[in-house]
Image (cartoon, rainbow, N blue to C red):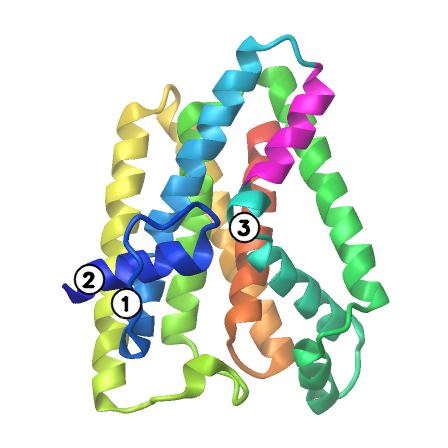
């Protein structure tokens, strides 16, 4: 029952799709994070389905690239994009640590956030345009969001939280045990989804490279942000997810 509740908490919190079973338990936030890969797979399946639909419609490929750029952001309610912008504002300010943390929590949008998101969306569009001129494997689009969320979810559960993070609350023996279980849940999903993807992929080595770049990109982005901001929080998780997906799409275009 706890796992079911955690799954639907993740659905309701990280997806804009109507949640079929609304459940919430403040004591199960770690299990909610544990099902981030499943949320990513749902996004990936829709992302891949949209790409197949657009492929058979008489739509210019630049328009197709724009629509594919928007799909994961719309499905996640722009939640992770917001975290990406907040982190860019704080990191690029080059201020002392306390000031960077204050900027991170500031609800106002700064110039660095705007500049960064413009370049991000340009990058997504350019990489998709290039990938479409070659071909995109359905499986790769399914896996990219699941893998990026696996990396960020593990980082939230295993890294030291920032003092102002909601995940800093409730640190104790029971919370630590729950985090270990949630981390194991993420790893099980990552292994199962990746194995299924490699079996279904038209070019397994290519898919392995794309997912590897996605996971490594998310990990490096989180590590950089944690070093710059003094700990882990939800904004940094979003920062990692966005960077992982951007680099995954780049891998689609160049590998």
Residue beneath the point at 73% across and 80% down: 103
Image height of 170 relative to 184, above or below: below
Q: Is residue 78 visible?
A: yes
Left or right: residue 154 versus residue 192 is right
Q: Is residue 123 left or right of residue 114?
A: left
Question: Horizontal and vertical percent for residue 164?
Answer: 54, 87
Residue corresponding to mark 1: 31
Residue at 19%, 62% in the rendered image: 3
Q: Secondary structure at mark 3?
A: helix
Q: If you read the primary sequence from the N terminus, does the residue marked by circle 1 or circle 3 appear first? A: 1
Element class at badge 1: helix
| Residue 250 shows in this picture | no
- Is residue 63 found inside the magenta-colored segment of the image? yes
Mark 2 or mark 1: whose residue is earlier in sequence: 2
- Mark 2: give few (<14), some (14-19) or many (20+) Cα within 10 Å: some
In the picture of the structure, the residue carrying the numbered disc 2 is 3
Which residue position holds label 3? 244
State yes or no: residue 171 in magenta: no
**CA separation, marks 3 and 2?**
26 Å
């Amino acid at each position: 029952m706890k796992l079911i509740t955690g799954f639907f908490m993740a659905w309701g919190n990280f997806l804009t799709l109507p949640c079929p079973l609304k459940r919430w338990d403040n004591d199960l936030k770690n299990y909610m994070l544990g099902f981030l890969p499943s949320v990513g797979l749902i996004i990936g399946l829709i992302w891949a389905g949209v790409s197949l639909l657009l492929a058979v419609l008489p739509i210019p490929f630049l328009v197709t690239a724009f629509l594919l750029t928007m799909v994961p952001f719309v499905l996640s309610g722009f939640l992770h994009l917001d975290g990406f912008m907040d982190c860019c504002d704080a990191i690029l300010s080059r201020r002392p640590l306390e000031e960077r943390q204050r900027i991170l929590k500031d609800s106002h949008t700064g110039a660095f956030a705007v500049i960064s998101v413009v370049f991000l969306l340009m990058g997504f569009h350019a990489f998709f345009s290039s990938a479409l001129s070659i071909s995109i494997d359905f499986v790769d689009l399914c896996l990219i969001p699941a893998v990026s969320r696996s990396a960020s979810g593990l980082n939230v559960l295993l890294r030291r939280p920032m003092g102002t993070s909601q995940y800093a609350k409730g640190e104790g023996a029971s919370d630590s045990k729950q985090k270990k279980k949630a981390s194991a849940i993420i790893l099980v999903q990552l292994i199962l989804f990746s194995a299924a993807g490699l079996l279904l992929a038209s070019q397994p080595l290519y898919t392995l490279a794309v997912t590897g770049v996605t996971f490594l990109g998310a990990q490096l982005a989180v590590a950089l942000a944690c070093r710059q901001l003094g700990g882990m929080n939800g904004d940094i998780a979003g920062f990692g997810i966005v960077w992982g997906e951007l680099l995954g799409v780049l891998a689609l275009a160049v590998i």
